[in-house]
């Protein structure tokens, strides 16, 4: 057996690296005595037996500079140790990296506490699981064990891939036959547009505020998050301030549903302010924007939790599971939901200057990718997603840039013209629009029909960009009355855009 993995009775030699990395005056960690290798001031600790016999193991959740789990096996008077960034694998289909670290004294199996910031391994350490193990194989490059712990049971193998890097593999199926891995391709459930449910059934509904942001599903596993847009695109890099959510959940596996918003100075969601954060693909740029223009993730549903799909549970039970998670942090929270009294919820949304409310039937299951009458959006402000088909230059100082946008909706005959918008633009929005429109310019008109007066001086573009406008009403000839620009919807595709009506046919962010 190789010295690096076997352990031996001359513990001081084995624990020399452990001692070199730590100052006993600065860390609460147990320190082996220089003469015997035992913790200072204590007798030499003998190999202990786990609860089910055999030698002991411990898994410690370590919130250091990067969250990881320390996996330690008792052997020959020391704890042979690996740092596992994503925790032990829960199914045989996924291997996890395990980095071999220095051996630790046996007393470390009891250690929980906070290592001072700036010290080696600085951060909180807490015991996540412990128990006993049996050895099936132990060599320099491969270790096979059977674990019997409170949370962890089964056969695992660690195998070396190069230097300190090993991989950890679960060799058998999870002990729970109903266990399911986190799904990877789920699309959010969508709401229909309508009015408040009738008063006679008001208590059968919950009411949430409607947030003006970007829908996101959050996959949490091994203390890390992955964000997916409504269309399934990976948007994790765009919002680095949300990574702490994964660390808060630690070893909990979850699939969460929520809305990413940018708050204005009054604390209200502003889609216009959020625009600069959407689809930022450069990590450095995203970090800068996270500092200057931070977002908040508002979490309102949980779809999968620790090996269990919650999709078929009623909304009321999913809501209970979500609240039990206690998700609250610097960039994420679980907003309130109110059972019954929809009229009061709508008045509250109006008083707070919000977009409206969402009514959700308490008994409703979660239907991925489906638009359901079990969720109803009731809006205070009429809004319409639009496809940009062209633009006209402005007057005066805006003569060289966008003065108004020509808007349309997809139809069977092509892009149906619905009018122009020339209000609501900020200088930053105009600069961004000019750059984007310049890249998709074309010579021919993309609309099925457009009035000659509106086509005068028009610069045509391929109908690829989706935006959103607020408006007063539809005119008799199908035009938007008094539209005001709200921002680009880079999370949407043109083929998803439909006319907002109260019959449930419309697309929306929620």
Image (tube, rainbow, N blue to C red):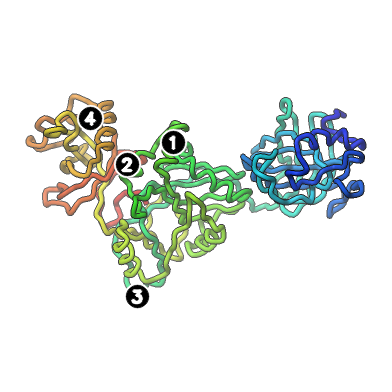
Q: Earlier in the sequence, mark 1 or mark 3?
A: 3
* Label 4: how many Cα within 10 Å (few below 14, some 14–19, many 20+): many
Answer whether residue 240 is visible to the viewer in this image.
yes
Q: Which mark, by number, is residue 200?
A: 3
Quarter that holds the N terminus: top right
Cα distance in 3D space between marks 3 and 4 = 50 Å
**Where residue 87 sits: x, y (%)?**
67, 43
Q: Which mark, by number, is residue 463?
A: none
Closer mark to the observer between disc 2 and disc 4? 2
Q: Which residue is mark 4?
A: 461
Q: Earlier in the sequence, mark 3 or mark 4?
A: 3
Q: Which residue is mark 2?
A: 489
Answer whether residue 91 is visible to the viewer in this image.
no
Compared to 131, does 397 lie above or below? above
Q: Which residue sits furthest front?
A: 25
Cα distance in 3D space between marks 3 and 2 = 37 Å
Depth check: 92 or 75 in front?
75
Q: Which residue is mark 1?
A: 288
* Label 1: how many Cα within 10 Å (few below 14, some 14–19, many 20+): few
Cα distance in 3D space between marks 1 and 4 = 32 Å
Depth check: 437 or 199 in front?
437
Compared to 64, does 374 lie above or below? below
């Amino acid at each position: 057996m190789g010295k690096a993995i076997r352990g031996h009775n001359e513990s001081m030699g084995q624990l020399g690296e452990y001692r070199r990395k730590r100052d006993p005056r600065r860390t609460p960690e147990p320190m082996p005595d220089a003469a015997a290798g035992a913790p200072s001031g204590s007798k030499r600790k003998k190999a202990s037996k786990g609860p089910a016999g055999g030698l002991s193991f411990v898994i410690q959740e370590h919130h250091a500079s990067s969250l990881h789990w320390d996996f330690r096996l008792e052997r020959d008077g020391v704890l042979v140790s690996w740092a596992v960034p994503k925790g032990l694998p829960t199914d045989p289909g996924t291997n996890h990296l395990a980095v071999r670290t220095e051996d630790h004294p046996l007393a470390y199996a009891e250690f929980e506490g906070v290592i001072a910031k700036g010290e080696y391994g600085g951060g909180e350490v807490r015991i996540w699981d412990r128990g006993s193990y049996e050895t099936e194989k132990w060599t320099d490059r491969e270790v096979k064990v059977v674990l019997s712990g409170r949370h962890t049971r089964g056969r695992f193998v660690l195998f070396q891939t190069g230097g300190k890097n090993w991989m950890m593999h679960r060799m058998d199926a999870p002990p729970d036959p109903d266990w399911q891995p986190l799904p990877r391709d789920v699309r959010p459930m969508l709401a229909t547009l309508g009015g408040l449910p009738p008063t006679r059934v008001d208590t059968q509904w919950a009411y949430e505020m409607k947030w003006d942001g970007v829908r996101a599903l959050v996959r949490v596993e091994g203390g890390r998050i992955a964000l997916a847009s409504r269309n399934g695109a990976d948007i994790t890099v765009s919002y680095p301030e949300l990574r702490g959510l994964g660390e808060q959940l630690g070893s909990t596996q979850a699939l969460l549903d929520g809305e990413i918003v940018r708050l204005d100075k009054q604390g209200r969601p502003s889609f216009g302010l959020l625009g600069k954060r959407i689809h930022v693909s450069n990590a450095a740029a995203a970090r800068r924007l996270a500092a200057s223009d931070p977002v908040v993730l508002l979490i309102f549903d949980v779809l999968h939790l620790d090996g269990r799909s919650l999709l078929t549970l009623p909304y009321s039970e999913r809501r209970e599971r979500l609240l039990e998670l206690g998700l609250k942090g610097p960039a994420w929270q679980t907003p309130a939901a109110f059972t019954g009294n929809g009229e009061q919820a709508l008045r509250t949304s109006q008083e707070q200057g919000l977009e409206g409310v969402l009514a959700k039937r308490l008994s409703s299951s979660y239907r991925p990718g489906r638009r359901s009458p079990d969720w109803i959006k009731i809006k205070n402000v009429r809004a319409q997603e639009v496809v940009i088909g062209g633009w006209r230059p402005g007057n005066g100082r805006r003569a060289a840039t966008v003065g108004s946008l020509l808007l349309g909706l997809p139809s069977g005959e092509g892009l149906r013209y619905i009018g122009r918008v020339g209000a609501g633009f900020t200088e930053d929005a105009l600069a961004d629009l000019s750059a984007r429109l310049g890249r998709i310019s074309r010579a021919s008109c993309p609309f099925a029909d457009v009035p000659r007066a509106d086509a005068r001086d028009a610069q045509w573009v391929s109908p690829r960009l989706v935006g959103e406008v607020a408006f007063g009403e539809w005119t008799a000839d199908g035009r938007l009355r008094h539209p005001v620009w709200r921002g680009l919807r880079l999370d949407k595709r043109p083929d998803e855009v439909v006319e907002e009506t109260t019959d449930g046919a419309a697309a929306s962010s929620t």
